[in-house]
Image (cartoon, rainbow, N blue to C red):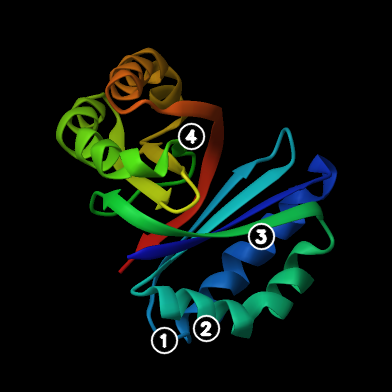
């Protein structure tokens, strides 16, 4: 599986209208594209950040859909976004998607790694880190996205609600620290979002 992410930053006063349009229009636009497998929409309304992830069955499907949809995407984001960053990733590890309600919480950890250590990191995450994270109260689903050649990636974890997201910080930090020690990972940032939409086929 492969994922295209879109990260947009803009005026918090304008975010609600953009989030509403993305929630309604993006899944319909994506669903008609070959290889489409799901969509997620996350928002930080206080700081003015939107993150989306669309799931695809192949790298070719990611590329082709981007050509078809980039103009429509620009139109939807233009009233809100000051900057927009688009990336494509391998979904190296992921758990089954969750059925979460309004108010679910999402934590995104971005990292860098030597490309030669990518396989070690994937195995460490799958066999050691993920089971610890899955045991945290309120856990719903998780995914590790990788750009192997670029030596960068992220881990996203979704929790049932904002209270569970907040309560998980210490335990997820402990699990993350063990992975960093084993796989020589450099953590670049940690962000938290509200889950607006989540569906994966």
Label at residue 20: 3
Of the two numbered discs 1 and 4 in the rendering, the one whose residue sits closer to the viewer: 4
Label at residue 105: none
Of the two numbered discs 3 and 2 in the rendering, the one whose residue sits closer to the viewer: 2
The local crowd at label 3, few if under 14, some if 14 to 19, many if 20 or more residues have their Cα within 10 Å, is: few
At 34% from the left and 42% from the top, the residue drawn is 116
Which label's residue is closer to the chain start, 1 or 2? 1
Which one is nearer the viewer's eye here, 81 or 43? 81
* Residue 52 percent coordinates (x, y): 56, 56
Relative to 154, 28 lies left or right: right
Label at residue 64: 2
Q: Are marks 4 and 2 in contact (CB under 8 Å)?
A: no
Instruction: Name the element at disc 4.
Output: strand
Instruction: Name the element at disc 1.
Output: loop
Q: CA distance from mark 3 to mark 4?
A: 30 Å
Which label's residue is closer to the chain start, 3 or 2? 3
Q: CA distance from mark 3 to mark 2?
A: 26 Å
Label at residue 34: 1
Give the residue pinned by disc 4. Answer: 111
Q: Are marks 1 and 3 in contact (CB under 8 Å)?
A: no
Which label's residue is closer to the chain start, 3 or 4? 3
């Amino acid at each position: 599986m492969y994922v295209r992410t879109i990260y947009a930053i803009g005026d918090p006063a304008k975010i609600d209208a953009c989030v509403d349009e993305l929630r309604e229009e993006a899944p319909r636009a994506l669903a008609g594209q070959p290889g489409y497998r799901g969509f997620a929409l996350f928002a930080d309304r206080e700081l003015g950040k939107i993150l989306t992830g669309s799931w695809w069955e192949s790298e070719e499907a990611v590329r082709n859909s981007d050509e078809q949809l980039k103009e429509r995407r620009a139109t939807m984001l233009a009233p809100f976004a000051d900057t927009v960053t688009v990336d494509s990733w391998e979904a190296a590890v992921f758990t089954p998607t969750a059925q979460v309600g309004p108010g679910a919480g999402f934590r995104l950890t971005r990292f860098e790694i030597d490309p030669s250590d990518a396989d070690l990191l994937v195995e460490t995450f799958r066999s050691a880190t993920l089971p610890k994270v899955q045991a945290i109260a309120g856990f719903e689903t998780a995914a590790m996205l990788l750009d192997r050649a670029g030596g960068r990636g992220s881990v996203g974890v979704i929790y049932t609600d904002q209270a569970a997201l907040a309560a998980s910080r210490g335990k997820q930090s402990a699990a993350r620290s063990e992975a960093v020690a084993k796989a020589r990972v450099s953590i670049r940032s940690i962000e938290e979002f509200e889950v607006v939409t989540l569906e994966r086929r």
